[in-house]
Amino acid sequence: MSKVVHFAPSWISGVRVNGGLTGQRNFGTLWSSIRTIHTRTKPRIPQPPKIRPSQSEQNKGVTRSDGDSSFPSVQLIPATTFGLGCWQVYRKQWKEDLIREMERKIHMEPVPIPENLSELNAMEYETVKVRGEFLHDQELHLGPRACIVHGDSHTTGGLFSQREASIGFLVITPFKLEGRDDKILVNRGWVPKRLLDPATRPEGQVKGTVELEGVVRVQENRPQFTPQQRGAIFMYRDVDRMANLCGTEPYYIDAKASSTVPMGPVGGQTRVTLRNEHLSYIVTWFSLSGFTTWLWFRQVVRGKSF
């Protein structure tokens, strides 16, 4: 809808118009200076009526605003996070029992290696005695690894510097059992990178029949993002592939610290600790459950919105 509004200058009222043609001419000149402005007006849109809660909703204490405050997620999140917290409590107990079982096995009295080597699959972390001879010409390496003692990263008795102890490799050597045709893999221990070549540590290349104790280990799953093995250096304990490469049985033991030789592999490279971060997960899930329960009570029960 359009409306025409006429505006006249304020000084027109103060002009005297004399009769005759001159007055008419002057008045026409003044009238031509009047401005005409067209304006457009829009009809006012009425506001929608407010929706009042029904009587049943008022009895239940439920309020309705621009958005419903009783979202399903507000009701489900407290229960879900509480359940995850309870699950982490169970996981923490399971992990602690597993660590205790590993510690118990590794401190058991050593036993002779069984005649049937397949029994070793059920003896992980138990200690066995072996007697035989190393086949140094088929030596493999696993790493890089840090030198460890009793499961912790340290230097070992001053044999190597702190810098050397941070980067090195594990020496994996085939071992022919005495009086048998069976051959297994033995992790002799850790050497620094500068002694990776066996020619640089002739004192450590023990010859003849030896007797040692070792901790039974099994196949390790390839860690995520770890590249495939290439050459004679392995990134993880791939027992099956090592055995195929050296022509041995797929059984593997970690030589204990008593097998350490000067300028040679440092034995005892068995880590018996596991990551146990379930306590932090328990705190996180129960905290989320408590906070979302408070949000649900505030919005749904008390009818307050943020």
Image (spheres, helix red, strand yellow):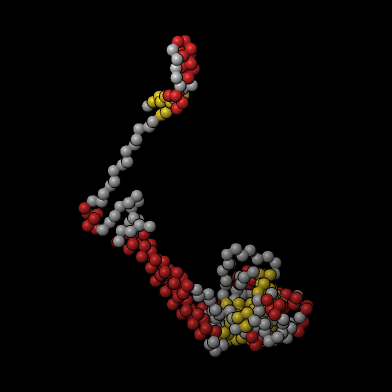
Whole-percent x, y for residue 184 in the image: 63, 78
Residue drawn at (47%, 72%) of the image: 280
The residue lying toward the viewer, choosing from 144 and 125, is 144
Residue drawn at (46%, 26%) of the image: 11
Residue 198 occupies which quadrant of the picture? Answer: bottom right
Quarter in which the N terminus is drawn = top left
Whole-percent x, y for residue 300 in the image: 31, 59
Residue furthest to the top: 21
Residue 148 occupies which quadrant of the picture? Answer: bottom right
Q: Is residue 12 above or below residue 67?
A: above
Does any portion of residue 306 appear in the rendered image? Answer: yes
Left or right of 109? Residue 53 is: left
The residue lying toward the viewer, choosing from 250 and 93, is 93
The residue lying toward the viewer, choosing from 252 and 303, is 303
Quarter in which the C terminus is drawn = bottom left
Left or right of 93? Residue 261 is: right
Whole-percent x, y for residue 120 in the image: 55, 79
Residue drawn at (70%, 67%) of the image: 231
